[in-house]
Image (spheres, helix red, strand yellow):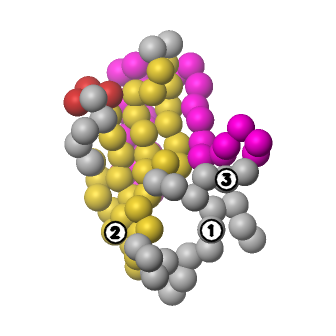
Amino acid sequence: MPKFQDAAENATKKYGYKGHKGPEYDNGQINQGEHILSIQDDKGDFIRFHVNINPSRNTTTWHWHLRDDNFNEHYGQIQLQHNSLPKWGSE
């Protein structure tokens, strides 16, 4: 989490902050895809946080993308091991 926090703080200092969006669909359901959070300025997203979950749900790879390179590069690539991982938003 410290790497994610540093990336968010540095990008926000550079672009400012207008808002953010999480993984929720319009109907309030949680999207089980890769996207978990975007932070935005007046032009839209400037940083996007993602997590990839392997099929067995015991490994996740957390990373982020930046507007600076048109969201092409993966930064962070933080891999975590889990016994199991529930779906987002479940108890």
Q: Dot 1 surroundings within 10 Å: few (below 14), some, or many (20 or more)? A: few
Which range is magenta?
1-28
SS for callout 3: loop
Which residue is label 2 attached to?
Answer: 79
For residue 87, the mark is: 1
Of discs 2 and 1, which sits in the foreground? 1
Kindly indicate whether the residue at mark 1 contacts the one at mark 3 (C-beta within 8 angstroms): yes
**Which amino acid is tagged 3?**
Ile
Q: Residue furthest top?
A: 42
Residue 78's quadrant in the figure? bottom left
Kindly indicate whether the residue at mark 1 contacts the one at mark 2 (C-beta within 8 angstroms): no
Judge whether residue 54 can be spotted in this image.
yes
Cα distance in 3D space between marks 2 and 3? 22 Å
Q: Quadrant of the C terminus?
A: bottom right
Whether residue 20 sits left or right of residue 10 in the image: it is right
Across and down, in percent, residue 2 comes to 41, 53
Q: Residue furthest bottom?
A: 83
Q: Residue at x 69, y 60 (%)?
A: 89
Judge whether residue 16 can be spotted in this image.
no
Q: Earlier in the sequence, mark 2 or mark 3?
A: 3
